[in-house]
Amino acid sequence: MLTLADRVRLEAKALEFRLPQDLLRAASATACRRLFRIASPYRERDDELKAIFLHVPKAAGSSVRAAIFGGQSYHIPARRYFAGDPSRFDAYYKFTFVRNPWERLYSAYQYLRAEHDASMAYPDHRWAALYLRRLPTFASFVDKLSDRRFLSQVRKYTHFRDQLDWLTLPGSDEPSADFIGRFENMAVDFSVVAKRLGIAAELPQLRVRNDATRIASAYTPRMTSIIGDIYVRDCRAFGYCSPDA
């Protein structure tokens, strides 16, 4: 189950998405160091490439980060990069990859559900043990999202936040990325980023079409409607339709 430190960190992360920019900038150094365990959102490779990868969870971001930056990826929202150094944020090339919200939710559930009874040494596993242990099927999970209290807790978690949350600055609903690639068009869009950065990099082959077909079959019309209502901001911002459309 979640530890006290887990709960504090989760609330701190949720607060980060609600703070006005001035307060976020004032708290940035302390928050990064104490709550998020990194001194600065900017890494050495970011400065070498003069680029910021805005990693949306469950959109192949770990593979992108490894291929281009050669290191571990952290889920860092655009607002923390801006608060950490507005001049670098404005000057650097910012890119991201987004994913169909229905497919992304299914992927996040399957990933976390698989870890619900694994080692409790990791925060993801502890979160899954608390929230997913009694929801053994994807259908039961989506049905539970109709419970507003449960939905509120789920949407605070890294893997289930709106994709827009990771890409926007306080007071704006416009993505701050210079380039928004799509998981569904990963090979082509990744090559655009690599060319812009002037690097030779390759991603592992992704079986996107097979995954999309399998995921679409996991949804009933009611489930599709529930998720469409929850992630309406992402659907409108990125032009996504339901998996059976």
Image (tube, helix red, strand yellow):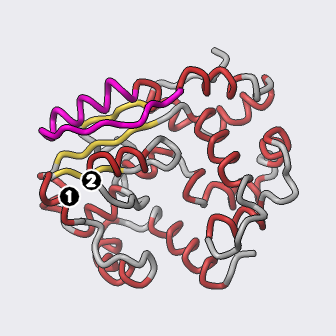
| Magenta stretch contains residue 194 | yes
Image marks 1 and 2: residues in contact by CB distance under 8 Å: yes
Total marks placed: 2
Q: Earlier in the sequence, mark 1 or mark 2?
A: 1
Q: Which numbered dot is residue 46?
A: 1
- The three-letter amino acid code for the residue at tag 2 is Phe
Q: Position of residue 54 (x, y in %)?
A: 34, 50
Location of residue 224 by image quarter = top right
Q: Which residues are magenta?
A: 186-207
Q: Residue furthest top?
A: 245
SS class of the residue under badge 2?
helix
Q: Nearer the viewer, residue 222 or 52?
A: 52
Horizontal side of residue 126 vs 185, given as left or right: right
Q: Quarter holding the C terminus?
A: top right
The answer to whether residue 41 is left or right of residue 114 is: left
Q: Label 1 sits on what residue type?
A: Asp
Residue at the spot 57% in from the left edge and 35% down from the top edge: 101
Q: How far across and down, in percent of the image, does residue 3 sit?
A: 68, 82
Residue positioned 60% across, 60% down in the render: 156
The residue to which callout 2 is attached is 69
Quarter of the view holding residue 39: bottom left
Give the residue drawn at x 45%, y 51%: 165
- The residue lying at 65 percent from left, 32 percent from top is 228
**Is 43 above or below relative to 69?**
below
Residue 79 position (above or below residue 119)? above
What SS does tag 1 mark? helix
